[in-house]
Image (cartoon, rainbow, N blue to C red):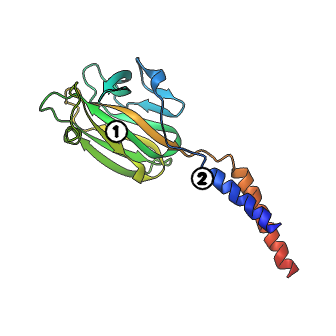
Amino acid sequence: MLRRVSALAFAALTASAFSAQAAPIDLSSLIDTSGNPVSVPELSISTPEVAATIFVGGAPVFGVQEVVFCAFDGTTCANDLILTFATPSTDVSFSVGDALPVGAVDTIQVSAFDAMSNLLGTVDVDSGDLAAGGADANGISQFTVDLSAFGTIASVEIDDLNTAATGGFFYYDVNASPIPLPAALPLLALGLGALGAAKRRKRKAA
């Protein structure tokens, strides 16, 4: 009996461990729309900038058609952004692109927060980081921001530190592994409870 209950608990733990998988978030339903916020079931994108709205469009980036977005104020994409995940997620990453004029400089600070709004860490990205990866036929440079080292993330704030920049940055290819309440959790609780009861009975019998 004890062996059977242990197997039950192990099966529940295994099911929980594999309940989430890293995947790109599909933003294609938002193409050619704007607003503040805009959202899909997995992610909400907003801006704290009063004069800006989130614009989503399609654009070729290094030969691949991408769904790109930015906080656009009518002149530039050099505005702050907030990405809020519907479910706290791990393995978070996204790509940054730009089509800045020659000599233009822009810098962003990316901050990751947990579900209690605690700062998990920051990453700074500037136009030099993007330029190091080269540019495509349209003059677009790109860079991937990998936040996987910060663990489980509920939201990401992108603070553009140079709002005077012409053009600014745009964003695409957001990836995340959501951490849902495991469907196996009730089964795990049942298994662990039965395991504890079996151990108590065994001790009494001894």
Residue 158 is marked as 1
Q: Which callout, 1 or 2, points at the residue further toward the start of the chain? A: 2
Determine whether the residue tagged by mark 2 lies in a helix, strand or loop. Answer: helix
Q: Which mark is residue 17?
A: 2
Residue at 42% over, 36% down: 174
Q: Position of residue 82 (x, y in %)?
A: 40, 36
Left or right of residue 53, residue 100 in this image: left
Residue flagged by tag 2: what amino acid is it? Ala
As drawn, which residue projects farthest toward the right? Answer: 205
Q: Nearer the viewer, residue 126 or 14?
A: 14
Q: How many numbered marks, from 0 up?
A: 2
Distance in Å between CA atoms under marks 1 and 2: 30 Å
Q: Which part of the image, by quadrant, shows the N terminus? A: bottom right
Give the quarter of the image for residue 48: top left
**Front residue of 38 and 196:** 196
User: Can you say which quadrant of the picture contains the C terminus?
Assistant: bottom right
Q: Along the line of sight, which residue is nearer the eye, 169 or 162? A: 169
Decide if residue 188 is on the left or right side of residue 64: right
Q: For numbered disc 1, what is the local secondary structure?
A: strand
The residue lying furthest to the top in this view is 32
Position of 88 relative to 138 (above/below): below
Residue type (three-letter) at the residue carrying disc 1: Ile
Tell which tag, 1 or 2, sits nearer the viewer: 2
Q: Residues within 10 Å of mark 2 (few under 14, many from 20)?
A: few
